[in-house]
Image (spheres, coloured by chain):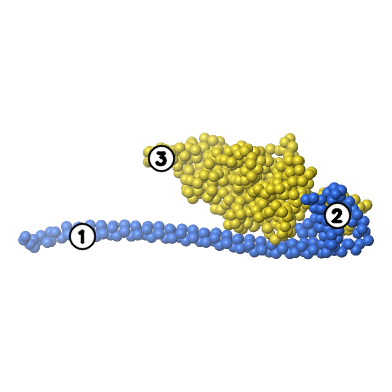
Amino acid sequence: MTALAPEANAALEPVRKALRAAAEEEAAGIRSAARRVADKELEAARTEAARILATAAAEGEAAAAAEAAARSARARRQAHELVLGARTAVRVELRRRVREAAAGLAEDPRYPELMTRLREKCHELLGPDAVVSESPEGGVVAVAGARRLDLTLPVLAELRLDSLPEAGAQWSA
Amino acid sequence: MSPAAVPGSPDGAPGPWLRDIAAQVSHGDVRELRGPLLIAGSAEGVGWDEFATVDLDGGEQRHGLVLEVDRDLVTLQVLESTDGMSLGGIGIRFQGRPLHLQVGTGWLGRVCNGRGEPLDGGPPVAGTDLRPVSGWPLNPVRREPPQEPVLTGISVIDALTTLVRGQKLPIFSVPGLPHLTVATQIAAQATSSGQSFRVVFAAMGLTHADIAYVRDRLEERSAAEELVLLLNAADDPVIERILTPRIALTVAEYLAYTEGHDVLVIMSDMTSYAEAVREVSAARREIPARRGYPGYLYSDLATLYERCGRIKDHDGSVTIVPVLTMPAGDITHPVPDLTGYITEGQIVLAPEIDARGVYPPVDVLSSLSRLMRSGAGTGRTREDHLDVAAQVLAALARARQAAELAELVGAAALSETDRSYIAYQDMVEKELFNQGQAELRSLEDTLGRAWAALAALPEQELTMLSTALLARYLPRQADRP
């Protein structure tokens, strides 16, 4: 291969310039396209990140709200149960006192009359063969075969308490 | 307490406790114990369906219902079963009448077991009135047809299978689907326009985890004294389940017809109830019908479901949403089958929709509210409601065909219209049907979402909607996604 003639260099100069310019232009084009793609990817990644963040925040908020609601629900329920528990305690106490007071009614002057009526009631319900005996708690217990009737004073007192029309009204106030 | 109040005494008014004294007679002649049944002899004057208290030696008390009387032989169904009982030392006190329940507003805010006894630590629920739990048969001519919607805040139900005041609309599900979550969401969110709304939730055979979920989820409503919770857990006596829905309905009837509330009764799970009925029937050695259930299962279920409705000259209403699981997804199983005969439609949950991550997984093409026309439309919900619902369903049916075609020939080979139907199905599931478990959607929001999904279809496909409705509600092209 022989070197170009010295005058050829000068003649090729515009070609070289043109080639170089074209290459540079293409490089710039590639560069800017790459930048555009990178920007786009970056933008998409940022959007995706923001979306994930927003979803996570919303989920977290919802979970926290649900947790808070559940906690407050439980606290409210416990408070309500305390009130109900107190009502039960009062009720149990009242029943205990009523039973006690009923046992004391054996001293009442009307007690013998009551006993007569209770005996009559036992015979009416269990038949004339029923064996009726007085209970140490007051009142009577009757037995006829496999049937038994407990009409002791505490039992009668509780029955009466349950049958009062206002029974229970005091517990719901 | 005065002894003068003893019956027969001069000033003692013979109050209801006269019967109470007769009910104190304790019968000790127990002949046989068999599963949930107890056979007692020498019990004269006892009637069918009487309630009884069974006293055991150690002071324990159980409860029973008289199933059968043959001369002086009585068959008693013991609610807590006869496990651990021995023939000696049992005393049975017959109440002289079927089980009665004290009903009143005192039930609101309370949590009780399946027999109506408190679980919340409170005293027994007191009431102002005594009612038999089996209910009074309602004179058919005094009934009024169901009307006005009960809005649940769940889009797919409100839009396509609207629940109506006084209706009975069951949820058909299979084990493993979130039917309890849906039922609880309905219980937590349901309202009716202009009326005070109350909910009675009867849980039958639920696990303790499920019960804890229901209690937490409904606490808000319970604290507001708008809820009655009756809980029969999976490990509670099975036979007790026979009473649970009856107690729920008795309380609901009082709240509706005496207090004038709109009452929603949720009963979950009715399959557990039917199993209890089957257990008693088997113990009685009755001839079994389909799958061992008794032949009278239909009429038994009807005595429950038919207690819903509205009554002339009374404000309130009783609406029933029973939940039932179909073993192995079999819709011909006796429980869903017989339920379907009685109820007015059904909401069907489907595993394949659940698998797509849609909650609530309602299969809308199998679901139906027969009374929807009485509860939706002009003057009730919105003028476009019924037409939109019809169009949404029709388009979904077409979308299903298009999807089947796409499986055969590939989506690319479909026409432009068919592709729009597939896009519509996707949108309707994601935007309209899919919903948060605590999300309450207004009817406006729901119908807006339905219109937005319909906008995915070409306008000429919307043949069930009048041009006036299209002009008013269809999102304009520019606003469409």
Give the secondary structure at mark 3.
Answer: helix
Q: Are marks 3 and 1 on the same chain?
A: no
Residues tagged by mark 2 and mark 3 found on one chain of the structure: no
Crowd rating for badge 2 (residues with CA inside 10 Å; few <14, some 14–19, many 20+): many
Residue A63, x across and y down, in percent: 54, 60
Q: Chain of mark 2?
A: A
Q: Residues within 10 Å of mark 1 (few under 14, many from 20)?
A: few
- Hey, what amino acid is under mark 1? Arg
Look at the picture and state if B377 lies above or below A25: above
Q: Residue at x 91, y 54 (%)?
A: A116
Q: CA distance from mark 2 to mark 3?
A: 88 Å
Which chain identifier belongs to the blue chain?
Answer: A
Residue shown at the point (63%, 50%) measured from the top left:
B238
Horizontally, residue B47 falls left or right of residue B177, namely right
Residue A20's disc is 1
Quadrant (top left, top right, bottom left, bottom right) of the C terminus of chain A? bottom right
Give x and y (percent) for residue B78: 69, 49
A81 w.r.t. B18: above or below: below
The structure residue drawn at horizontal position 77% and vertical position 52%, both measured from the top left corner, is B127
Residue under label 2: A132
